[in-house]
Every structure is written in structure tokens, then in C-alpha cells.
């Protein structure tokens, strides 16, 4: 029957492994209880990682694992209107830093390969990625110079000057120049017209939080918000529910492509609740293999009172929680009160719906410092903050963090509260692996350790003591968290009720108290809470955490593989030489290849690839390349393909596809890849595009004119001439693989010797504009 009995030795080993695995995984927090780090600050930047925050976070990830971080919240990762934007000015939903448009490739997080690696490295360290998503607006219509973005017949919203034509580059239609005609002819997925925003013929604007264009054209999710552009060349039909359906399609594609585990929804009061519930349900249950579950981490940003927060959670069927801004009012009051705030009132500030609540102290919206040239605090942009900030060096910071961790929910840690980047002139030049150059606040690290290793959330929330200067919360039989609001005086409490049996010896795991205490009198205990001035042992400020003696570090999230899926279609990706040159459907009657994407894989591991074609009867070749772009393995076949590639070295690996025959029709396909990234990746490894050669278009333009430039002859055999109008400029010539061949500067006229170039198609970049030419 094909059943083999293990011998006793192997059976014993298997059972031990099974039991250890079961216990190990049982220690991991549910998403609703995870400790989440906000992995950025407002206008985040590091000079060692320019336009590469994904690489910064990848280097930081082992330190996060070591202190017990469960998940990291990253900023929006789609292409914004400018390269300096930090994610909240979204332009192209399907550009993750792989397309060349608006004159640049990378987002502030880096290019697409680096983004996907960052998420994979986090998973290798047992850390989930929470993706920030903007659903209420987009901005930046028009080419790099703004041409083509305005629709003259659009209804005016009084703010965006009718810039509501959104067209995007794609593999089929790269941005060879920035003219209006080129922009309006781009066929990238999910184009948008003025009717998709407020106001349109059926829906007015500017009367409430949902229909007002605070940050750009404000999306109209109503079923009748659709129509055609009055001046676009590429102008596909739109039907009922266009924006709601296409945004749903995008967010599910986004989840499959990147592999994040949960979402933070930005500005949720500015789009309909039914839209949020729709998208959350589909991420949890309607996204095929990438579906999560009802447990998926999801939080919305609603700035308001407890009743408003509870109502929104109820309206989305508790598929997401909210940041507890109501609780934060109490935390701000504690800090600003300087000892006069009544701690006994803190529990009454919390929102009532706490199923998925997120207690927090600071975030990028509440914390907007004015910085000097070294990144040190010299003031505060209070007009830009959503509420008052809490100073990271305030003596009561530890106290309010201890409270936020003691309550139900998923406590969030702000980057600048955990890491000291505001006082040491280190903000812009530190290395994330350097514990001296990027120090952590030890109190916050200790509170995280206690939450994880004492397993706060395995015990029910019980308020044990309330008075003006003291608050004690027990996580039933797991930990006793006590805080003291006095600056200089210890707070001694006698007879605090607990759930432990008499005789239980408790230790202060904050180490503020060096002596143990013993439970007596039916579960009572006497404790001392340190003041906020740092005079206690280990410099602890205003908190202590008691639990039974003998508990060692036991909490560790297991390393995980990641699965990411690429869709190969002509309206995705980009063939521009300045792009990553990935994507595109397989062409008709051609064996020209297409690059699917790249993965950074750990040594001695398996890359599992699944390919799903549009046409099951046509054979496709699936090819794996090493870091030097050399093919190392391949398979061919019709229908769905499944193959495991073994790799021996840590490296970038490129996946290509092509038709098996040059006599067959082209088609699209989906390529799903499961792999293990290194937990501590070598970011110095060279990343070559390994691009496929893309044949020239069927028609050749003999002379190309663009604004002030005139380029001729084309095709050319010896000298290529550029003429302009009194402008000093630069030029770079690239081959089809994006390799730089010739560069130079010129004034008015350039005569470029191209005789030594091999015959074929090339691209010339003049300033920020790109043209194509043929070398005979």
C-alpha cells in the first residue's frame, strides 16, 4: 500500500520534532495582539540608503527579530508623483518602482526588486509586513512635465485645476518622451478619467469629509462615477462601479505580488466604509491562494473620539480595528500633566470595541519635528500634527508605553520612540546594524521583552489598582504592570489583589526592583513602583512589571518562506531602458523572452515556481538565471508548470519565460514563486537587470523631433546629430539591455560617432527625455 513504518529511533525523533514545533508555534501572538513597529518617520531618509529604504529595513530586520518585534508597518510603496514623496501622494497603483515614468524609476523605498526582497527578508526573520494603503485620493496627473494631465471639460473641484487624466507607462507603451501625445497614449493598467473623481455628473464635491479633495483628486466610489476622457488617445471603456472594482482588483494583485501580511488603511474617514469592508473581506477570503483569514492584521486611521472609532469598527464587521486616538488623549494628558493627571481615569478613555484595537503613543502624523541639518530636534511643526506630540526623551515616555502594552490590542511602537535619532546627529548617516550609531531606548526594549516573554495577551485584562498617581493592570496570571506618575517619589502599594496563589514568588522583570515579593492573604502582593526620574535600577522610569520567577526568554517568531506572484501582461511592467525591463506578455510568433522578476534567495535552498498560462495548449519555456545572468536551469511544457530549482549560493536569481516555438501565438501568464530569503542578506551583491532583448517597433521614424530637440539621421550608420535651441544638455546612449554605451555634454549641437556600435536598436537619453534610434 506504499506505507512505510518508521523505526523507533526515527519515530522518536519525529515525535520530539512535532511536539517542539507545536509548542514553538503556540507562542506566537495572534495578529490582533502583535507588537508592531512603525518602520519610518515623516520624511524618512538615510544618506547611506538613498532611494532605498527597503534595503535599510532589510539590514535592520535582524535587530527587530532579536527584540521581539512581530510586524513592521511600511509606508505606501507604489509610484508617487515625485521621487521625494514618502508614499502618500500616489500616482500609479501598478508601479512598484519597476517603471520609468515622470523621469525616475525608484520610489523612496527603492525599486521593485528591493521592495520584494525587503518583505521576504522580514518573513525570514519571522516578521510580518503591514502595508500602508491610500484609498481616498491620487495625484500627479500628467507626464514628468505635467503635459496631458489636464482634461478641459472636467468639472472643477476648486483645487486640482482639472488635472484628472491619469495614464501610465507599460511594457507595450513606455515613456519614450514626455509630450502630451505620448502621455495620453500610454496603455498601462487602471487608467483614470475626471468622472472617477469628485465632482462628476452624478456626485457633487466639497460638502463633507468623503468628497473633498484635501490631497489631490478625491476618488468617487459610487457606481455611476465613470466616463471617458475628452482628450486622451488611449481611452478604454469604463462601466458601472469602475473605481470600486478596479481598486479591488489592484489591492488583491498588490497582495499577491508583494506578499505582505496585513494592512494599515490611511485616512479612513475620507472614503466610504462599505468600500473598506469590501476590500478587507476580499483580502481575507476572496484572493485565492493569497487570502488571509478573519485574523488578518488590519487597522484604520480615524482621528476622532471613542464612539467614532467603535462605530467604524462595527460598520466594517470588525474586519479591522483602529488606532486608539481616544486612549492617546489620556497618554498625552499624562505627559503634559507633569504629575497632575489622574491615572485612575485612564481605562475610561479607551474605545469600547477592542477586538482589533491598536494602542499607540506617537506616529508620523502626531510627530512632526523641526530638524537641524543633522536631523536633531529644534522645534515642532504643531500645525501639521494630528494632536500633540510626545517627546521621546520625556521622563514619562516609558510610563505611557507600559500602559499601552498592558491594554488589549496590538501595541504599536513608533520608530523615533524606539530608536534615538533626534539628539545624536545620527538621523541621516547611521547604519541600521550599528547598535552604537543607532541606539535603542532600553525601557522600550524591556517593555517589548516583557510583553512577549511573559505573554501578556494570554491573560485577561484586569484593572487591579486605580488612584491619582498609580495604576496597576494585571494580565490574568501572566503579569502585573504598574505605573507611577510621580517624578521623584516611589509609590508603595500594599495589598494589591492578583490571580496568583499564595506563596507565589514574583520578580520585577523591569529590574527596577531588585528584590522579589511573595503573594499572600488570598492573592495579595505588596509592590513598589519607581518614579519617572530614572533613579531606579537600570534607569527605569515610572513602571515595573511583575511575574513569577524563573521565566527566561522563550518568545521567538519562526522564520518563514514567502510566496510572490507576477502577472505577465502588456499593460503591466515596462520596456523602457531606464526601467527594470520586466513584465510583458509573450509575443506572437517569436521566442523573444520576457523577464518575470528577481528574487534574492538564501544559500542551499529551493525556489519553487508555478506557471499558469492563459492558453494551456501552447508550450512555454521557464528559465532560471544566476546573478551573472547565466541560465542555470530550465523546463518546458504545456499547461500549468511546477518546478523546484535548487540553488547553492545566496544570490539574486532572475526568472524568464518565452514561447517554446516561434510559430505559436503569444499569451500572458502568471508565475508564482515560493522561496526563502536570507535573514541577514548580503546587500552588496550585484543586481543586474538580466533584461531580454526587445526588438524595434515595426515602423522606423526617419527623424524625431521633441520640443527643442531634433535628432537625425535615423536610422544612422556613422554620426548621430542632435540639435537644440541654445540649451546646454547631456546625453547617454543605452543598448537594449540598459547598458550605458556613450555619454557626453553638448551645447546647441552634438555630433556623436556611433560607427563602432553593433547594428540594432538603441536609446538616447537627452536630459530627462528618451528617444530611440536604429544603428545600421
Image (cartoon, rainbow, N blue to C red):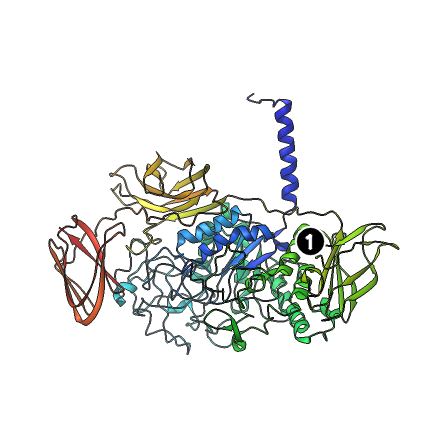
Q: Nearer the viewer, residue 372 or 561?
A: 372
Tag 1, which secondary structure? helix
- On screen, residue 595 versus residue 534, left or right, reads left
Q: Which of 59 and 71 is in front in this view?
A: 59
Quadrant housing residue 98: bottom left
Asked whether residue 428 appears in the rendered view, the answer is: yes
Residue drawn at the location 53% of the way across and 44% of the way down: 560
Percent x, y of residue 413: 59, 61
Quadrant housing residue 721: bottom left
On screen, 534 above or below 665?
below
Quadrant housing residue 192: bottom left
Residue drawn at the location 43% of the way across and 73% of the way down: 199
Q: Which residue lies furthest to the left in this view?
A: 718
Q: Residues within 10 Å of mark 1 (few under 14, many from 20)?
A: many
Residue drawn at the location 78% of the way across and 53% of the way down: 506
- On screen, residue 604 versus residue 522, left or right, reads left
Q: According to the image, label 1 marks what residue?
A: 457
Residue drawn at the location 14% of the way across and 50% of the way down: 756
Q: Residue furthest top?
A: 1
On screen, 162 above or below 355?
below
Q: Nearer the viewer, residue 127 or 5?
A: 127
Q: Which residue lies furthest to the right in this view?
A: 521
Percent x, y of residue 193: 37, 66
Asked whether residue 353 appears in the rendered view, the answer is: no
Quadrant in which the N terminus appears: top right
Q: How many labels does the image show?
A: 1
Percent x, y of residue 6: 61, 23
Percent x, y of residue 145: 30, 69
Amino acid at each position: 500500500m506504499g506505507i512505510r513504518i518508521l523505526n523507533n529511533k526515527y519515530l522518536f525523533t519525529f515525535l520530539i520534532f512535532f511536539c517542539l514545533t507545536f509548542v514553538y508555534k503556540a507562542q506566537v501572538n495572534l495578529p490582533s495582539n502583535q507588537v508592531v513597529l512603525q518602520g519610518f518617520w515623516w520624511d524618512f531618509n538615510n544618506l547611506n540608503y538613498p532611494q532605498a529604504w527597503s534595503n535599510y529595513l532589510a539590514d535592520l530586520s535582524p535587530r527587530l527579530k532579536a527584540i521581539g518585534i512581530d510586524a513592521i508597518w511600511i509606508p505606501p510603496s507604489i509610484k508617487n508623483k515625485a521621487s521625494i514623496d514618502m508614499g502618500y501622494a500616489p500616482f500609479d497603483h501598478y508601479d512598484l518602482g519597476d517603471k520609468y515614468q515622470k523621469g525616475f524609476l525608484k520610489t523612496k523605498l527603492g525599486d521593485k526588486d528591493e521592495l520584494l526582497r525587503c518583505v521576504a527578508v522580514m518573513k525570514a526573520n519571522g516578521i510580518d509586513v503591514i502595508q500602508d494603503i491610500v484609498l481616498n485620493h491620487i495625484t500627479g496627473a500628467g507626464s514628468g512635465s505635467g503635459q496631458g494631465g489636464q482634461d478641459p471639460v472636467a468639472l472643477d473641484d476648486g483645487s486640482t485645476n482639472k488635472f484628472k487624466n491619469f495614464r501610465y507607462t507599460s511594457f507595450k507603451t513606455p515613456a519614450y518622451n514626455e509630450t502630451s501625445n505620448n502621455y495620453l497614449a500610454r496603455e498601462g493598467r487602471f487608467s483614470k478619467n475626471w468622472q472617477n473623481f469628485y465632482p462628476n455628473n452624478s456626485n457633487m464635491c466639497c460638502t463633507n469629509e468623503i468628497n473633498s479633495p484635501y490631497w489631490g483628486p478625491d476618488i468617487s466610489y459610487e457606481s455611476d462615477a465613470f466616463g471617458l476622457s475628452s482628450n486622451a488617445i488611449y481611452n478604454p471603456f469604463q462601466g458601472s462601479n469602475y473605481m470600486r472594482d478596479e481598486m479591488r482588483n489592484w489591492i488583491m494583485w498588490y497582495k499577491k505580488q508583494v506578499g505582505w501580511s496585513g494592512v494599515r488603511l490611511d485616512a479612513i474617514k475620507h472614503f466610504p466604509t462599505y468600500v473598506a469592508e469590501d476590500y478587507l473581506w476580499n483580502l481575507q477570503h476572496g484572493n485565492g491562494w493569497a487570502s488571509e483569514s478573519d485574523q488578518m492584521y488590519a487597522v484604520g486611521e480615524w482621528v476622532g473620539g471613542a464612539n467614532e472609532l467603535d462605530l467604524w469598527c462595527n460598520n466594517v464587521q470588525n474586519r479591522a480595528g483602529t488606532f486608539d486616538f481616544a486612549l492617546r488623549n489620556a497618554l498625552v494628558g499624562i505627559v503634559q500633566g507633569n504629575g497632575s493627571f489622574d491615572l485612575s481615569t485612564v481605562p475610561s478613555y479607551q474605545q469600547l470595541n477592542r477586538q482589533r484595537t491598536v494602542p499607540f503613543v506617537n506616529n508620523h502624523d502626531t510627530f512632526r519635528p523641526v530638524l537641524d541639518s543633522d536631523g536633531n530636534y529644534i522645534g515642532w511643526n504643531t500645525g501639521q500634527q494630528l494632536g500633540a506630540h510626545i517627546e521621546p526623551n520625556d521622563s514619562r515616555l516609558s510610563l505611557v508605553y507600559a500602559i499601552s502594552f498592558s491594554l488589549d490590542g496590538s501595541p504599536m511602537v513608533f520608530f523615533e520612540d524606539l530608536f534615538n535619532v533626534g539628539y545624536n546627529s545620527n538621523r541621516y548617516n547611521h547604519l541600521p546594524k550599528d547598535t552604537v550609531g543607532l541606539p535603542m531606548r532600553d525601557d522600550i526594549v524591556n517593555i517589548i521583552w516583557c510583553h512577549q516573554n511573559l505573554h501578556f495577551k494570554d491573560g485577561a485584562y484586569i484593572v487591579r489598582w486605580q488612584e491619582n498617581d498609580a495604576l496597576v493592570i494585571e494580565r490574568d496570571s501572566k503579569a502585573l504592570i504598574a505605573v507611577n506618575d510621580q517624578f521623584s517619589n516611589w509609590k508603595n502599594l500594599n495589598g494589591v489583589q492578583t490571580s496568583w496563589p499564595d506563596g507565589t514568588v514574583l520578580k520585577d522583570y523591569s529590574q527596577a526592583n531588585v528584590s522579589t515579593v511573595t503573594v499572600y492573604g488570598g492573592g495579595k502582593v505588596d509592590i513598589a513602583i519607581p518614579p519617572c526620574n530614572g533613579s531606579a535600577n537600570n534607569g527605569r522610569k515610572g513602571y515595573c512589571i511583575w511575574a513569577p520567577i524563573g521565566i527566561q526568554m522563550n518568545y521567538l517568531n519562526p522564520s518563514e518562506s514567502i510566496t510572490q506572484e507576477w502577472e505577465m501582461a502588456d499593460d503591466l511592467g515596462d520596456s523602457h531602458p531606464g526601467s527594470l525591463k520586466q513584465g510583458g506578455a509573450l509575443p506572437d510568433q517569436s521566442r523573444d523572452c520576457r523577464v518575470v522578476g528577481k528574487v534574492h534567495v538564501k544559500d542551499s535552498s529551493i525556489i519553487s515556481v508555478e506557471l499558469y498560462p492563459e492558453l494551456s495548449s501552447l508550450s512555454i519555456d521557464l528559465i532560471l538565471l544566476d546573478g551573472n545572468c547565466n541560465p542555470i536551469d530550465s523546463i518546458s511544457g504545456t499547461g500549468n508548470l511546477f518546478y523546484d530549482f535548487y540553488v547553492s549560493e545566496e544570490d539574486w536569481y532572475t526568472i524568464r519565460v518565452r514561447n517554446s516555438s516561434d510559430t505559436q501565438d503569444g499569451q500572458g501568464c502568471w508565475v508564482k514563486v515560493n522561496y526563502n530569503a536570507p535573514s541577514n542578506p548580503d546587500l552588496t551583491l550585484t543586481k543586474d537587470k538580466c533584461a531580454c532583448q526587445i526588438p524595434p517597433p515595426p515602423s522606423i521614424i526617419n527623424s524625431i523631433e521633441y520640443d527643442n530637440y531634433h535628432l537625425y539621421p535615423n536610422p544612422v550608420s556613422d554620426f548621430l546629430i542632435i540639435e537644440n535651441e541654445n540649451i546646454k544638455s547631456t546625453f547617454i546612449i543605452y543598448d537594449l539591455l540598459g547598458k550605458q554605451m556613450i555619454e557626453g555634454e553638448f551645447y546647441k549641437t552634438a555630433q556623436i560617432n556611433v560607427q563602432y556600435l553593433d547594428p540594432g536598436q538603441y536609446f538616447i537619453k537627452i536630459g530627462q527625455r528618451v528617444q530611440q534610434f536604429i544603428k545600421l
